């Protein structure tokens, strides 16, 4: 295990996650991460009666994943980019907490028997990502509206005769962030980037 992986494992087991579960999970997850994608948090199921290895919720800066071990050491991964998340809910009971994700396709994913502290931390991260995605959607809609209207600024318009152009560096930075969040594809990013650079 490399030093960086060991440090990451240490940071992902601050809320009493079992390192013997998170370690192998991290090795598998790192094999499916995309460029600049990083694991931010892991919540590990803690069933009252242990029969199989626990399910886990893995949250990265680009998507949320549900890792479900099956028989014969097989694993199923279900993952969704953050822009697919419509709603995340947290429900607590005496034996732990249930985290529920609802996607844009209407799919509902539930992970129960999560320790309450881990479920709360995962839920807070989901809320933060939901807010970022909403902001990115708003920015993208505004960008599309500006492009459709020929970059005319309606509210707070400058005095007549003074033309304003959006800052190309800021636009490029926003586009890169949108791509990293999974809001636009790499192809869309490259096309928009080329368009902005051609106008500079």
Image (cartoon, rainbow, N blue to C red):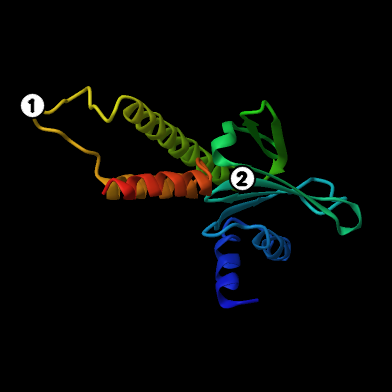
Q: Is residue 166 above or below residue 36?
A: above
User: Callout 1 environment at 10 Å: few (<14), some (14 to 19), or many (20+)?
Assistant: few
The disc label shown at residue 64, or none: 2
Left/right placement of residue 151 relative to residue 28 reads left
Of labels 1 and 2, the one closer to you: 1
Q: Position of residue 137 (x, y in %)?
A: 44, 33
Quarter location, residue 17: bottom right
Q: Nearer the viewer, residue 62 or 114?
A: 62
Q: Is residue 123 above or below residue 190?
A: above
Query: Could you tell me if residue 137 is visible in this image?
Result: yes
What residue is at 60 percent from the left and 48 percent from the top?
118
Q: Earlier in the sequence, mark 1 or mark 2?
A: 2
User: Callout 2 environment at 10 Å: few (<14), some (14 to 19), or many (20+)?
Assistant: many
Circle 1 is placed at which residue position? 159
What residue is at 55 percent from the left and 70 percent from the top?
7
Label 1 to label 2: alpha-carbon separation: 46 Å
Residue situated furthest right in the rendering: 72
What residue is at 84 percent from the left and 47 percent from the top?
49
Query: Could you tell me if residue 95 is visible in this image?
Result: no
Q: Nearer the viewer, residue 173 or 150?
A: 150
Residue situated furthest front in the rendering: 198
Q: Is residue 39 above or below residue 138?
A: below
* Disc 1 and disc 2 in contact, CB within 8 angstroms: no
Q: Position of residue 160 (x, y in %)?
A: 8, 25
Q: Nearer the viewer, residue 133 or 185?
A: 185
Q: Position of residue 6 (x, y in %)?
A: 60, 72
What residue is at 69 percent from the left and 65 percent from the top?
27
Quarter location, residue 135: top left
């Amino acid at each position: 295990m490399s030093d960086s992986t060991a440090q990451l494992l240490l940071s992902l087991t601050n809320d009493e996650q079992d390192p013997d579960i998170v370690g192998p999970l991290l090795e598998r997850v790192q094999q499916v991460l995309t460029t600049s994608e990083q694991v931010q948090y892991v919540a590990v199921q803690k069933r009252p009666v242990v029969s199989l290895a626990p399910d886990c919720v893995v949250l990265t800066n680009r998507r949320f994943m549900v890792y479900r071990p099956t028989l014969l050491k097989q694993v199923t991964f279900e993952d969704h980019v953050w822009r697919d998340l419509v709603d995340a809910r947290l429900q607590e009971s005496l034996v732990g907490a249930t985290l529920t994700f609802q996607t844009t396709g209407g799919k509902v994913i539930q992970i129960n028997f999560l320790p309450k502290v881990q479920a709360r931390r995962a839920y807070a991260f989901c809320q933060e990502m939901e807010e970022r995605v909403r902001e990115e959607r708003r920015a993208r809609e505004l960008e599309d509206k500006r492009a459709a209207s020929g970059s005319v600024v309606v509210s707070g318009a400058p005095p007549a005769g003074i033309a304003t152009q959006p800052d190309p560096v800021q636009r490029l930075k926003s586009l890169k962030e949108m791509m990293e969040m999974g809001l636009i594809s790499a192809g869309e990013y490259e096309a928009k980037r080329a368009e902005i650079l051609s106008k500079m």
